[in-house]
Image (tube, rainbow, N blue to C red):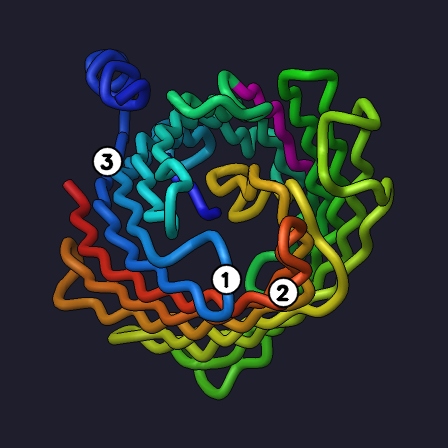
Amino acid sequence: MTSKKLIATALFVAGIGYAQNWNLSVQPYFTYINYSNSDIKKNGYASTLYGALSFNEGKQIVEGAIGYTHLTYKGNNSNWNQSDYVISYTNYFLYPWYGKLGFHYIATPNNHFSEKAKIYFGDIGYISRYKWDAGVFLSYSEYKRSVSAFETRLHSGFYRWRDYYRGFYFSYDLTWINVGNDANALNISKKNYYSAGAGVTYFTPAYKVVLYGWLGERTLMVDNGGFVVYNLEEKYKGGLNLTGVYYLNKKVWVQAEAGYSQYKETFSDNTVGVMTATFSVGYAF
């Protein structure tokens, strides 16, 4: 299930000493997870510390996160524990073009193919400021037992302004995931997965609200710009998320998110519902 992301701390400290016109923000997250109609999973939680350092007037951004996920399993099944470490670098020197590269590492004591998983990801795109944007996100996930996944996501969006400060942002994406694995390594035999998503954001100087949904098929998905990896054997069918952000002032904001998704449980063939609730507080230095 979801895993979002200390590596960053060292980089932030080092970067601050050399960067000019820098801005640093930190944001801890906590997520509660509940499963319905599952023969295996009961509930769980995830905690993440995220940070971002931008410098050279925002033309370079270093992001990092460290996260921990615990899932409580039913019966005699062993509980799931997982740590995630993520780092990424984005460059806007060729603006309106941008490029991003990142690395996500998963550590778990469980005997699983995703133990010591390495995920390499990148994004390249074009931004017409305050008008529209488009890009392509790529990732390669390298797991144990000859399991791997390659993902391509085409994404774009455009703005519709109500006035100088308020408006809507509409986003769209198409995702293709190709899974390569030894025939006996996974309980999912299908190789190719396709999905489509759409979202709308209403933003003001005081708050913003985001609604996003998707349909299709996803497994071993790399999401949220590389910071979330769905590394368990689950065939997701669709999902819906509602996020609200309120800015207390220029330095502090609070964020809450509710999500629902469904996947097919490979061991029982059940359709499982996943409810998530996330809360976070952000601070900009």
- Residue 67, by quadrant, is top left
| Residue 268: x %, y % from top left | 63, 56
Q: Residue at x 63, y 42 (%)?
A: 233
Q: Quadrant of the C terminus?
A: top left
Question: Where 17 falls versus 285 (above or below)?
Answer: above
Numbered circle sitting on residue 24: 3
Image marks 1 and 2: residues in contact by CB distance under 8 Å: yes
Q: For mark 1, what is the residue?
A: 38
Which of 20/41 is in front?
41
Percent position of residue 281, x then y? 18, 55
The mark that comes first in sequence, 1 or 3, is: 3
In screen coordinates, is 183 left or right of 209?
Answer: right
Q: Secondary structure at mark 3?
A: strand
Nearest the viewer among 246 and 224 is 224
Front residue of this view, candidates 275 and 119: 275
Horizontal relation, residue 164 to residue 47: left or right: right
Mark toward the viewer: 3 or 2: 2
- Which range is magenta? 117-124
Instruction: Report the residue that reaches farthest toward the bottom.
Output: 162
Q: Is residue 122 magenta?
A: yes
Residue 270 bears which disc, if any? 2
Q: Amino acid at mark 2?
A: Asn
Q: Main secondary structure of the magenta part?
A: strand
